[in-house]
Image: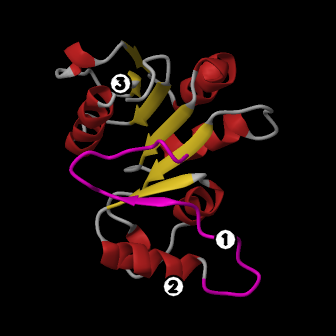
Amino acid sequence: MIPTQRRVLMVVHHNDTRCQKEALALIGEGYTIDLLTGAPCTYGDHFNMIITFHKWEHITTYVKQFAHLYDVIHTHCKPDHTGIHVLEALRGMAPRPALVHDPHDLDSIRCGSTPMTEQELILSADGLVLPSEAVREDVKDFFFRHPNSPAMPPAVVKPRKPSMTHF
């Protein structure tokens, strides 16, 4: 059992089912989850705290001010701007919480093109949450295949009970 003092900040722009499921699984493993969201949260009674942002810059401000409270900051995309603002806030911060990114649709595979924001988040993350083994292999081939590429971070493939104990 993970000690209850492990705190995760989930950052998502809108009411997102995947974020919800991952949060419930982590709460079940003993994590305390705060939610930073850009939309009113109608499913939030199990979150420790819900913080609503109204402008993208609010994400950066909150993370810079309160990152020290968290062990992990877990970003969800759509749009990638949520994660990019978290990444901006964490740059140069030491020590800093681990950054775990869930790219959801993964535009580079779904659309055949790679937005720079998606690429930057995947290459900067300390860990990834991916929807399948096939997508993990695609991410590895697409982003980490070249000899000069960084090592691929640990990736959890959307298990029934996601675990971030290794991040």
116 sits left or right of 36 in the view: right
Residues at badges 2 and 1 in contact (C-beta under 8 Å)? no
What's under tag 2, amino acid-wise? Asp
The answer to which quarter of the image holds residue 129 is bottom left
Question: Are there few (<14), some (14-19), or many (20+) residues within 10 Å of tag 2?
Answer: few
Front label number (2 vs 1) = 1
Residue 55's label in the rendered image is none
In the picture of the structure, the residue carrying the numbered disc 1 is 151
Residue 30's label in the rendered image is 3
Does the image show residue 80? no
Can residue 110 be found in the magenta stretch?
no
Question: Are there few (<14), some (14-19), or many (20+) residues within 10 Å of tag 3?
Answer: some
* Residue 30: % across, % down: 35, 24
* Residue 162: % across, % down: 32, 46
Residue sitting nearer the eye, 125 or 158: 158
What's under tag 3, amino acid-wise? Gly
Does the image show residue 163? yes
The answer to which quarter of the image holds residue 72 is top right
Can residue 154 be found in the magenta stretch?
yes
Distance from disc 3 to disc 1, alpha carbons, whole Å, reads: 29 Å
The answer to which quarter of the image holds residue 94 is top right
In the picture of the structure, the residue carrying the numbered disc 2 is 141
- Compare marks 2 and 1 and give the one earlier in the sequence: 2
* Residue 32: % across, % down: 40, 20
Residues at badges 2 and 3 in contact (C-beta under 8 Å)? no
What's under tag 1, amino acid-wise? Ala
Distance from disc 2 to disc 3, alpha carbons, whole Å, reads: 34 Å
Secondary structure of the residue carrying numbered label 2: helix
Where is 166 relative to 10, above or below?
below
Q: Where the N terminus falls, by quadrant?
A: top left
Where is 100 relative to 44, above or below?
below
The magenta stretch spans which residues? 145-167
